[in-house]
Image (cartoon, rainbow, N blue to C red):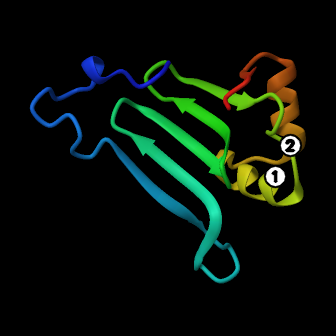
Amino acid sequence: MSLVYENMPSREKKLKGIAKVNNFLSPRSNKPVANQFKIVMQNGLEVFQSYDTIIVLKDKKNNEIYLDKYHWDYSNTTSRYRKLYLNEDTKTTKEKVEKGIYILEDLN
């Protein structure tokens, strides 16, 4: 699941567009929120990061979603932006964890 140089799509442009990082936008002001990031990787992985901690990893190629088992529900702020990222409330996220739809892993 880690980013491997040799498996990146274009050998000629290995570092071009390797990742795109965007701050989340506040639902109230539509301005960038400090320390809340969506990272889209060239290899099909997408990450929600809160401060220095990876909270959610989406593997779009394999249609899998991983949550950090220690931090996915860490604080009100983390939960607020995780809900936005996954487009669901905490109750729904917990149900998906219990059903094995989301995978808990140590992502940090």
Relative depth, front residue between 83 and 39: 39
Relative depth, front residue between 57 and 34: 34
The answer to whether the residue labelled 2 contacts the one labelled 1, judged by CB atoms less than 8 Å apart, is: yes
Which element is circle 2 on?
loop
| Left or right of residue 1, residue 89 in this image | right
* 55 versus 105 height, above or below: below
* Coordinates of residue 63 in the picture (x, y in percent): 53, 23
Amino acid found under the numbered disc labelled 2? Asp
| Left or right of residue 106, residue 60 in this image | left
* Residue at 27%, 25% in the rendered image: 8
* Residue at 43%, 23% in the rendered image: 61
According to the image, label 2 marks what residue? Answer: 73
| Left or right of residue 44, residue 10 in this image | left
**Neighbour tally class for label 2: few under 14, some 14-19, many 20 plus, Cα within 10 Å:** some
* Coordinates of residue 69 in the picture (x, y in percent): 81, 28
* 93 versus 63 height, above or below: below
* Residue at 50%, 39% in the rendered image: 46
* Residue at 87%, 28% in the rendered image: 95
Q: CA distance from mark 2 to mark 1?
A: 6 Å
Which label is found at residue 79?
Answer: 1
* Coordinates of residue 58 in the picture (x, y in percent): 56, 32
